[in-house]
Image: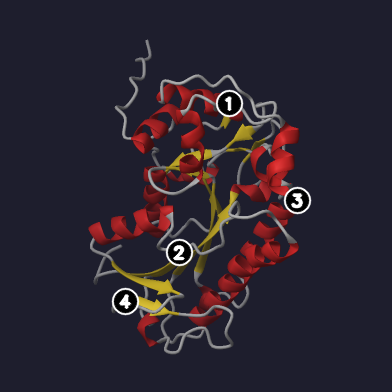
Amino acid sequence: MSGSQPKILLSGASGIVGSALRQALAEHGTSVLQLVRRPTGSPLEIKWDPHAACPLANAGPLEGLTAAIHLSGANLAAHRWTPAYKRELVDSRVGSTRALVRTLASLRNPPLAVLVASATGIYGNRADQLLDESSTPGSGFIADLCQQWEAAAHDNAAAGARIVHLRFAVALGPGPGALARMLPIFRLGLGGPFGSGTQWMSWISLYDVVAAILFLLEAPALTGPVNLTAPTPVTNSQFTSALARALHRPALLPVPAFALRLALGEIADEVLLSSARVYPGKLITAGFRFTHPKVDQALAIALGLPQPVTPALS
């Protein structure tokens, strides 16, 4: 980002990715405006209601944005998927995305790039198939949700802006997130694979997530879906073994699939037992270099441990 000081609009800035991204943008000298739904506490915060007929009382501060990054969405695993919560999951993603791109399209000087969150869950449960951005979507609630989510970004898209769909894998980093929910039981030595453990799990370090988004802001040729996932997906069994190893604990107690289904309902099959072996084809082709391509490295950074030594190639 060159020329005058860049100005980025960011939603979902309080999440694990949004918080880290906001800090990184600030360190790069970027002015970050945050969309919030609560009362504002700073001139850099803009209150909005994506479900209102007029989402922003005053869209003037959005004029002249360099880019907009939309990360908002209700937590997939916060509740059992009742019909009401499913509607909330859809509305918080599809509805908010549609409201934002329409608002941006109405500006006199809209941003040239709009990066919108999506997820590798769009590929569904695909067993051992290696998937990249050219792969077709799968089936299931999450896959359908992601397709609606991505389609919403093109609904009266922001006046010809470059639209990028950030297909996130599981982000491994400190703070709230999937890893934080696993740590208590693994620290007790009670962790283990989910179900058979053979299902593929796509992941990425929080550091590489942020670096990839900064890379995409500077890559005008990259558009459409981009997989934000490390180039080395692992099976659930390999991941749980790596986590237990990092914590110096055993991982000998698999959680039966029926127990997960009993406890979590539909989330078990759609999130924990689903297999997605996803490759970041577009990032690799564009020359992006991952700092943490191996899961042991990402876990060490997330847990504040020394980096594991990688044997030199002979």
Residue type at mark 1 is Gly
First in sequence, mark 1 or 2: give its number: 2
Which residue is located at x 34 percent, y 23 percent?
A: 308
Do labels 1 and 4 touch, CB within 8 Å? no
Observer-nearest of 256 and 76 = 256
Q: Amino acid at mark 2?
A: Gly
For badge 4, the amino acid type reads Gly
Observer able to see residue 151:
no
Tag 3 or tag 4, which sits nearer the N-term?
4
Residue at far front of view: 188
18 above or below 180? below
Relative height, residue 291 to residue 104 (above, below) = above
Residue topped by disc 4: 41
Closer to us: 148 or 175: 175
Residue 132 in the image: state x and y as whole percent: 61, 42
Q: Residue at x 51, y 64 (%)?
A: 72
Label 3 to label 1: alpha-carbon separation? 26 Å
The residue lying toward the viewer, choosing from 195 and 263, is 263
Residue 91 in sight: yes
Separation of residues labelled 3 and 2 (CA atoms):
25 Å
Nearer to us: label 1 or label 2? 1
Q: Is residue 187 above or below residue 225?
A: above
What distance separates the C-alpha of mark 1 from that of mark 4? 43 Å
Q: Specify the label residue 12 is tagged with.
A: 2
Q: Secondary structure at mark 1?
A: loop
Name the residue nearer the viewer: 41 or 119: 41
Amino acid type assigned to the residue bearing label 3 in the image: Gly
Q: In the rendered view of the protein, which quadrant contains the N terminus?
A: bottom left
Q: Secondary structure at mark 2?
A: loop
Instruction: Tell me where residue 275 appears, x and y as whole percent.
Output: 67, 36
Figure label count: 4
Residue on which the image places disc 1: 192
